[in-house]
Image (cartoon, rainbow, N blue to C red):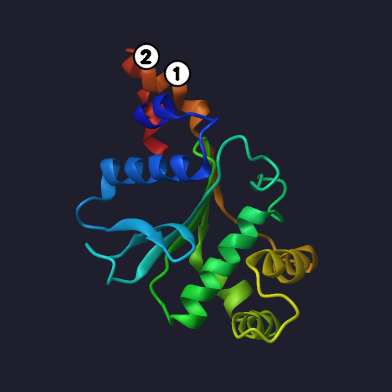
Amino acid sequence: IGLLDGLNESESEEHNKNDVGDFLKNTFYHPRFYINTKDRTDLVIHNGPDSKSFASVLIEAKKPSNKSEMIRPDNLNAKAFHELILYYLRERITRHNLEIKHLVATNIYEWHVFDAGFFEKTFAQNKTLVKQFTDFEEGRLAGKTTDFFYKEIAEPFMAGLNAEICFTWFDFREYDKPLRNDDKRDDAKLIAL
């Protein structure tokens, strides 16, 4: 309720990202797991109480009004997913992080949660993609910006991907009524969430 009531759709992506971080800290993670940005990754849940521990969850947070960059259950080939690919490859390939568990894309209302095993198998073990990523990171390609990676590497890779992508999706707006009313009978809908 606090997250939804505090949401200001006209605020910046940075503002909304901070709301997501506070929500995660206040609901479960703090103080056992450190949550903050990491380099260019919007939010990271570490597997320990400080930033020295490995990243365990990588989160891309979009503002609710940014529909063009946010993924949808029927279209994952959007900038938010391209960003998750880059974040994952930087953690896994560059930092040799073996402890990533999940990747998340959210606009505060909608949450798409991916198992890191899919990213490992599909992206980190794809030799062609890893070579392109390494060449990009080392400045050997025509472009050096993250937008170049998204448009020239990640987007075409996703367009040619012929694999089923499993993920968990939920929308907090579908839980607004049981969250706010006094009827305990419909609280069962919140258990799975």
Is 149 situated left or right of 193 in this image?
right
Residue drawn at 74 percent across, 64 percent down: 151
* Residue that mark 1 sits on: 177
Q: Horizontal and vertical percent for residue 42? A: 47, 55
Q: Residues within 10 Å of mark 2 (few under 14, many from 20)?
A: few
> In the depicted view, which residue is nearer to us: 84 or 150?
150
Residue drawn at 68 percent across, 70 percent down: 149
> In the depicted view, which residue is nearer to us: 55 or 113?
55
Measure the alpha-carbon separation of dots 1 and 2: 6 Å
Q: Tag 1, which secondary structure?
A: helix
Is 48 situated left or right of 168 in this image?
left
Residue drawn at 21 percent across, 57 percent down: 32
Tag 1: amino acid: Lys
* Residue that mark 2 sits on: 181
Q: Are marks 1 and 2 in contact (CB under 8 Å)?
A: yes
For the C terminus, give its image quadrant. top left
Number of numbered discs: 2
Q: Is residue 127 above or below residue 179?
A: below
Q: Horizontal and vertical percent for residue 107? A: 54, 41
Q: Horizontal and vertical percent for residue 68? A: 71, 44
> In the depicted view, which residue is nearer to us: 74 or 65?
65
Q: Is residue 122 above or below residue 192?
A: below
In this orientation, does residue 1 appear? yes
Residue drawn at 66 percent across, 55 percent down: 79
Tag 2: amino acid: Asn
Q: Tag 2, which secondary structure?
A: loop
**Among the 4 quarters of the image, the one containing residue 123:** bottom right
In the picture, the disc for residue 185 is: none
Q: Residues within 10 Å of mark 1 (few under 14, many from 20)?
A: few
**Among the 4 quarters of the image, the one containing residue 10:** top right
